[in-house]
Amino acid sequence: MTDITTTNKGVNVTPKTSVTVLFAGDSGDGMQLTGTQFANTVAVYGSDLNTFPNFPSEIRAPAGTISGVSGFQMQFGSQSVYTPGAKFDVLIAMNAAALKANLNKLHHGGIIIADTDGFDDKNLRLSGYGEGNNPLEDGTVADYTVFSVPVVSLTRKALADTGLSVKNIDRCKNMFILGILYWLYSLPIDTTIKTLQTKFKNKADIAAANIKAVTAGYNFGDETDMFAQFGRFSVAPAGKQPGTYRRVTGNEAAAIGLAAASKKAGLKLFLGSYPITPATEILQTLANLKQWGVKTFQAEDEIAGVLSSIGASYGGALAATSTSGPGLALKSEALGLAVIMEIPLVVVNVQRGGPSTGLPTKPEQSDLFISMYGRHGEAPMPIISAHSPVDCFYAAYEAAKLSVEHMTPVICLTDGYLAFSSEPMLIPSPAELSEIKPVFAKPRAADDEPYLPYKRNNMGVRDWAVPGTKGLEHRIGGLEKANETGNVSHDPANHALMTKLRAEKVEKIADCIPLQTLDNGAEKGDLLVLGWGSTYGAIKIAVDRAIKAGHSVSHAHVRYLNPFPKNLGTMLGNYKKVLIPENNCGQLLMMIRDRFLIEPVAFNKVEGLPFNEMEIEAKITDIVKEL
């Protein structure tokens, strides 16, 4: 293998604090895998990072067309990174459609690495440029730094002696591109080589070909005058807290959070679920944790999934179900059953664009209303939201804690952006995680007083009675319970009382959760930007910039959506205006307006794309000008 550690001594290396890269090409051509491998390398190197995969919902979208473009965007840097970047510095365009779909998001003067083999007449026609109208040659990209590289042709030459078919050789083209990018940003290729050796341990010829391709791409960058005249870049590792890190997506983090909660609580974990984009990876991740006592059940539908979890919870397990908006709708009747039975259940809802099938691979914050109100009867449930991929771990963990300790189903909201995005996670020690203390009813002797299954403590919580425990026989089911005894009751006054008690139990959770805090800014001022969920990173950067510009702006992010923190209303009253950016049509805004009788400023986006910091910064600027 060629020694790739020796580089041209005369090449200038320019240090950068952060870089945003977009890999773009046909859906199905491996853009997500390529971007993920680059992210793994950056993470091992020690940079902070944030990723955003963006791909069509079709299994095989029309090749060569704008609608068929798949992208993987990531920002990595030597300082804290909170978003994948509003715009990017480098565009890897594997064909003409990838260039056309993304050129407007590239920084002026940014770098384009274009695979010229993807700019033939067929690709130009399918992309909408038209045959003979090559954007690499007609001045379209004159304002950018363009490296035109015949990637497919060079990959075929590099692997000509491998004996592989042309089809298999062409699949290695992404490794060639990775090699170029590793050289350009002074990154090692060792992580990719190790990954390929592991992934293809039973296919030595495929592993060797991919390793040869990534090495050839690196050497191409090292030896060609095309790059040598331009120079290289370097991004130093981030100054992170010492410890053990791993790169996680939001779905992986949520799954691990549930597993951690089960261990902390001393309970078996059961997940009953039905595969649905973008939540499926939670089921997949937990299915690989059998050695830790985790049990997963892939049900035939969403209803069977949640009902199996309710059965597991009744049996004394930490039970969870994962889904997205359409699945949450199907689970609604069963969730009412969990509410009236008063048993613990964690529902991880990974939100996506709707309604109906909608935009299954695109993020949206459109399930707050259905989480809050989407059940028949009065069936309140606590709601927690995660604000970053790593925070999905802590949100799922806390949802499990609240569910077990308050004997109630809890909804944990993430979304497609957090689910597929990734960032480095500092692995906490078990001692750092808060205790989870289930309250099980104790066995009773024959001469004890009759067991009262719905007798409550001062927080309105009943004991957890596991079937088979001596002396704890009682009725269970969806019919209304008589207060304390749990017998079936149709008495009007009892129904009113039980409805009140179940609601009060959820409201009393406000006594157990932290008060609302500011992420940044002064406790009083002109403008408070109030967010929830995945808008966190974009709001944080935008508010930081606004404060540096001299504006009186603060940022608070609501984690507990039901019940709200006890001091939230007081905090809102300390500002002249409240701005609420949401990836929906104003659901939190309506809840805030109804509860606290204020009129916040709405900033809504329902494009299947997350907010970027530039959008929110511009909105902040417009508001403060009017104050």
Image: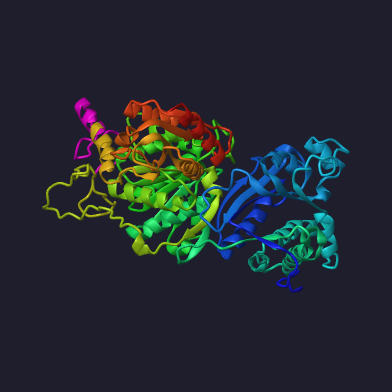
Residue closer to the observer: 32 or 229: 229
Magenta segment range? 474-499
Residue 354 picture location, percent across and down: 55, 32
Residue closer to the observer: 265 or 39: 39
Image quadrant containing the N terminus: bottom right
Residue under the image location 64 percent in, 49 percent down: 72
Instruction: State the image quarter where residue 503 is shown.
Output: top left
Residue 557 picture location, percent across and down: 41, 42
Residue 296: tell me if it is visible.
Answer: no
Question: Per the image, is 489 magenta?
Answer: yes
Image quadrant containing the C terminus: top left
- The answer to whether residue 307 is above or below residue 500 is below
Q: Is residue 206 left or right of residue 320?
A: right
Q: How many marks?
A: 0
Question: Per the image, is 213 magenta?
Answer: no
Q: Is residue 320 left or right of residue 118?
A: left
- The answer to whether residue 174 is above or below residue 571 is below
- The answer to whether residue 600 is above or below residue 483 is above
Residue under the image location 46 percent in, 64 percent down: 291
Residue 5: tell me if it is visible.
Answer: yes
Q: Is residue 606 left or right of residue 150?
A: left
Colour scheme shown: rainbow
Q: Is residue 602 left or right of residue 214?
A: left
Residue 230 picture location, percent across and down: 76, 57
Residue closer to the observer: 204 or 83: 83
